[in-house]
């Protein structure tokens, strides 16, 4: 099954054929309607015609303009770690998109590994979840994960991520492109975080910032990379990332931006023999695991394979250390700020000032 990135990329790349042209026209019409709806909705919130509820603790929202993976989890983890290091009790609140009934989703599983002392509450009603975190978990700060378009809950700081490999969702709103709303939404941002900055040229980075500033004016801005720190063997054994250097690997993923993951693996010096992509937020049910086994088994007949490599979001759901005799590993990713870190440090200090002294 094609990911959203692949699907839209195919539409843009297929220049011939009456059917493709008709499909583009229909999707463009749908995008126009979608854009009108989202613009009216945002206007109603901006004019306070639609109500916004305020939690009794300061709220930082981390979100993005596009569907698919922009690398929110490392940013959320970074902010949570910075707050915890300063003695702040923080709780992560998210909708829980993609979770199997009665369970949590892949982001929550990964964050639980990274931040065992930070509670994570998942509930489509983000206000109820945030207030519960304050009342029952004594949270001093709420981190809203993937909530840029969820405007029912007041946020004190808005952090918006742009993926350098596809910052503006192919230049179109859903369903023609990947934009959840117009890029004018960046005007609500307090801090823009450009992720995967190492995967494009300096000229491209400058063009992205220039376009964002042309639409939203000058905004606090940082550039980051998602730097692989180690290899994770399920459940908790870590090995140096350098073990991938010169190895022959198969990679698989069920994430929003598999192209960026592929490039990250290649950047570690691994030879990617073949890649298998599952749908975003794949829960790895029995049929998915069987498909994975058949794929790997077929390649093993003619190829030498050192590792099966996936993301940690995949591994925490798959929960396997070997498959068909091949060692399964995930990349442990950390956020690295490659520009002036002042804007994000300032944001952390500003939110700490909002915590009442008697709450410490």
Image (cartoon, helix red, strand yellow):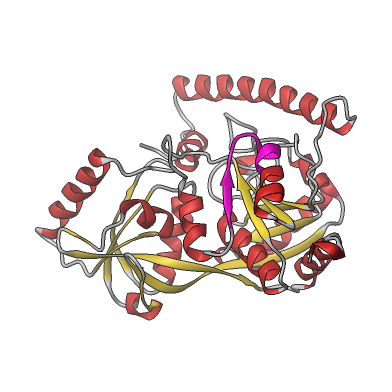
Quadrant holding the C terminus: bottom right
Q: Position of residue 60 (x, y in %)?
A: 74, 53
Closest to the observer: 90 or 337? 90
Closest to the observer: 38 or 130? 130
- Tell which residue pokes out farthest to the right in this image: 47
Please determine whether, in this image, residue 118 is positioned above or below residue 290: below
Could you tell me which residue is drawn at 38 percent across and 56 percent down? Answer: 316
Q: Is residue 121 magenta?
A: yes
- Tell which residue pokes out farthest to the left in this image: 301
Q: Magenta stretch: give its range.
A: 119-129
Could you tell me which residue is drawn at 71 percent across and 50 percent down? Answer: 134
Please determine whether, in this image, residue 159 is positioned above or below residue 305: above
Q: Position of residue 50 (x, y in %)?
A: 82, 26
Q: Is residue 253 magenta?
A: no
- Answer yes or no: is residue 149 visible: no
Please determine whether, in this image, residue 258 is positioned above or below residue 304: above
Q: How many marks?
A: 0
Left or right relative to 330: residue 86:
right
Quadrant holding the N terminus: top left
Left or right relative to 315: residue 158:
right
Could you tell me which residue is drawn at 28 percent across and 74 percent down? Answer: 247
Residue 244 is drawn in which quadrant? bottom left
Q: Position of residue 221 (x, y in %)?
A: 77, 62
Residue 279 is drawn in which quadrant? top left
Left or right relative to 262: residue 166:
right
- Answer yes or no: is residue 14 visible: yes
Residue 6 is drawn in which quadrant? top left
């Amino acid at each position: 099954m094609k990911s959203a990135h692949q699907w839209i990329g195919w539409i843009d790349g297929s220049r011939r054929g009456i059917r493709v042209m008709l499909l583009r026209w229909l999707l463009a019409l749908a995008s126009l309607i979608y854009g009108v709806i989202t613009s009216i909705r945002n206007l109603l919130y901006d004019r306070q015609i639609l109500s916004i509820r305020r939690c009794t603790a300061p709220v930082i929202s981390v979100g993005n303009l596009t569907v698919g993976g922009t690398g929110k989890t490392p940013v959320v983890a970074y902010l949570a770690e910075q707050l915890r290091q300063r003695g702040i009790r923080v709780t992560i609140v998210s909708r829980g998109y993609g979770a199997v009934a009665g369970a949590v989703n892949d982001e929550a599983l990964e964050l639980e590994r990274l931040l065992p002392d930070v509670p994570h509450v998942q509930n489509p009603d983000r206000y109820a979840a945030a207030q519960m975190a304050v009342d029952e978990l004594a949270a001093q700060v709420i981190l809203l994960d993937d909530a840029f378009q969820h405007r029912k809950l007041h946020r004190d700081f808005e952090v918006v991520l742009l993926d350098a490999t596809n910052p503006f969702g192919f230049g179109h709103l859903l369903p023609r492109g990947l934009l959840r709303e117009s890029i004018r939404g960046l005007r609500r941002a307090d801090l823009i975080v450009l992720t995967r900055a190492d995967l494009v040229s300096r000229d491209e980075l400058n063009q992205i910032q220039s376009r964002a500033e042309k639409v939203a004016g000058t905004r606090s801005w940082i550039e980051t990379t998602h730097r692989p720190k180690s290899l994770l063997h399920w459940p908790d054994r870590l090995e140096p990332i350098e073990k991938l250097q010169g190895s022959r690997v198969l990679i698989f993923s069920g994430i929003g931006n598999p192209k960026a993951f592929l490039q990250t693996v290649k950047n570690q010096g691994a030879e990617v023999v073949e890649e298998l992509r599952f749908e975003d937020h794949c829960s790895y049910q029995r049929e998915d695991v069987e498909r994975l086994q058949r794929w790997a088994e077929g390649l093993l007949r003619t190829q030498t394979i050192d590792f099966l490599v996936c993301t940690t979001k995949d591994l925490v759901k798959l929960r396997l250390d070997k498959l068909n005799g091949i060692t399964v590993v995930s990349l442990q990713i950390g956020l690295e700020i490659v520009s002036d870190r002042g804007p994000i440090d300032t944001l952390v200090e500003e939110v700490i000032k909002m915590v009442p002294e008697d709450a410490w």
